[in-house]
Amino acid sequence: MIEIERKFLVKSHAFKQEAFNSTQIIQGFLNTHKARTVRVRVRGDKGYLTIKGKSTTNGLERFEWEKEIALTEAKALLQLCEKGVIEKIRYEVKQGDHIFEVDEFFGDNEGLVVAEVELKTKTDTFLKPSWLAQEVTGQIKYYNSQLSKYPYSTWDK
């Protein structure tokens, strides 16, 4: 239940040719407290409820619990969420022994593309694809819970 991941900006759309899967995601947050977030997600034709704990100081680790729920329940819960829905397409790209999840955001976060790789340990190594840019692990403004409140379209770039 402890998630270990690193997050990066993406500098080109080359990942799309390498993707073996893509799924539309719509998600909202029932709670965005800094000690925990409660997320509702519709991913394709499935619904999910996820609770995430506070990240470690370096942003690499945090508690995550996720449960599949009925699609109708997820859609109903989205109506109760805090302001700011996240819309994105998630592309899955295999690179060596790891799978990168690349999120291309739409709506108020259009123009932002972020890749995450989940690791088994904090010191796990992985092959970096050529389309990865700056690492943003632990930068709170790139957390989806923050993007729902302070979208990319409002940032000074």
Image (tube, rainbow, N blue to C red):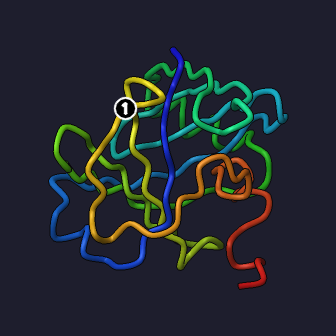
Q: Position of residue 95 (x, y in %)?
A: 20, 50
Label 1 amino acid?
Answer: Asp
Could you classify mark 1 by the number of other residues whose Cα lies within 10 Å: few (under 14), some (14-19), or many (20 or more)?
few
Q: Which residue occupies 32% across, 71% down?
A: 131
Q: Residue 84 or 101: which is nearer the viewer?
A: 101
Q: Which residue occupies 57% across, 23% down?
A: 64
- The image quarter containing residue 133 is bottom left
Q: Position of residue 13 (x, y in %)?
A: 31, 77
Return the residue at label 1: 124
- The image quarter containing residue 34 is top right
Q: Which structural element holds mark 1?
A: loop
Q: Residue 95 or 83: which is nearer the viewer?
A: 95
Outermost residue, top direction? 1
Does 101 sit above or below residue 65? below
Using residue 9 as the reference point, say whether residue 150 is left or right of it: right
Using residue 82 as the reference point, say whether residue 117 is left or right of it: left
In the rendered image, the quadrant that contains the C terminus is bottom right
